[in-house]
Image (cartoon, rainbow, N blue to C red):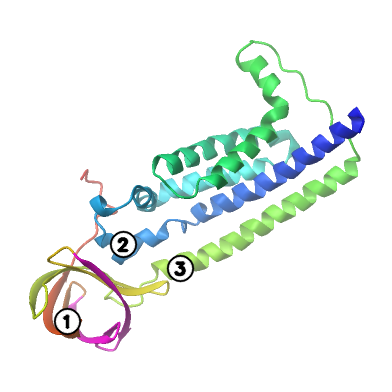
Amino acid sequence: MNRTGLVSAAEMAHSVIRVGLSLAMIGFGMVKVIPTQFIVFTLPGEMLVSLGESSPSGMLWKFMATSTPYTVIAGTVEVIGGLLLIFRRTVLLGALVCMVALIQVSTFNIAYHVPVLASPLIMLGMALVVSMPWWSRLIDVLFRNRDSAALPRPRGDRRIRLAGDIAHTAAAVLVIVFMGANGIRTYHSYTERLSSLDGVWAVDEFRGDGLRWVRVAIDDRPASRRLVLIRENGELTAQDVTVAEAVLHVGEWTLRYTQQSDARLHLTGDFDGTSLDTTLRRIPLHTESRDFR
């Protein structure tokens, strides 16, 4: 293959990597723009897992889930980086934005032992490859105090490049629409409370044959229907739950409930083969608090 053929092949490979990185970054960011990537840790049942019992990766997910604005901003930066890669005049800027975002993600994943390491590192490598034609020019501007020479015009038919840009833009729009619609559905299913029982409860009074209950969390949302409890020995138990009229079906057991107000709950019945009678008080969550604790 002659030099012209090699240059054309390199330009084609560069375009393929640029398009792949662009679409991956848009998809990568959309699960944060519509904050669903970490949303499982906003469920009441997850609130009962103490920080000391959380894994490093679980701590990171909780950190991200706690601040929706931070998550949305981080995702917006990733989406913007992917969009900038569509237009030839902004390819370098897009690659640099992607590199900054991916360095942060890769650092978090490595530092917090997140099992997903390969994807952001591969995407970071792709961003480096996309920015490669500008390396010498960036070195001139940043370190040698020289003016940067313009890149040579791309080879090939201009109409083919225009068609490629249109196809790239259309693919980006499809990714945004698909991820956006799926994200909205997921967000709704994780945040819609189906009953007033949904939440975290402290046990004020407990009468029963088994170990005393200390904390109870009820997930009653389309994405999760379960009862999670902590007993006095620190044991955490989770069971599927179905909320019916005045009755909770918890696994194979049935509990009757009365709710005097949104903040008070009374449960009676059998659970784990023992009878119980317990009064619970709703715990206000402090995820929106400005206190330093």
Residue tagged 3: 188
Q: Magenta part mainly helix, strand or loop?
A: strand
In whole angstroms, how far apart are the C-alphas of marks 3 and 2?
18 Å
Q: Which mark is residue 46?
A: 2
Instruction: Determine crowd level at label 2: few under 14, some 14-19, many 20+ residues with C-alpha closer than 10 A.
Output: some
Q: Amino acid at mark 2?
A: Glu
Instruction: Determine crowd level at label 1: few under 14, some 14-19, many 20+ residues with C-alpha closer than 10 A.
Output: some
Q: Amino acid at mark 1?
A: Leu
Q: Is residue 198 magenta?
A: no
Residue 21 location (% of width, % of height): 66, 45
Q: Amino acid at mark 3?
A: His
Residue 151 against residue 248 in the figure, above or below: above
Local secondary structure at mark 1: strand
Report whether 136 appears left or right of 79. right
Residue 136 against residue 158 in the figure, above or below: above
Which quadrant: the N terminus? top right
| Residue 268 seen in the current view | yes
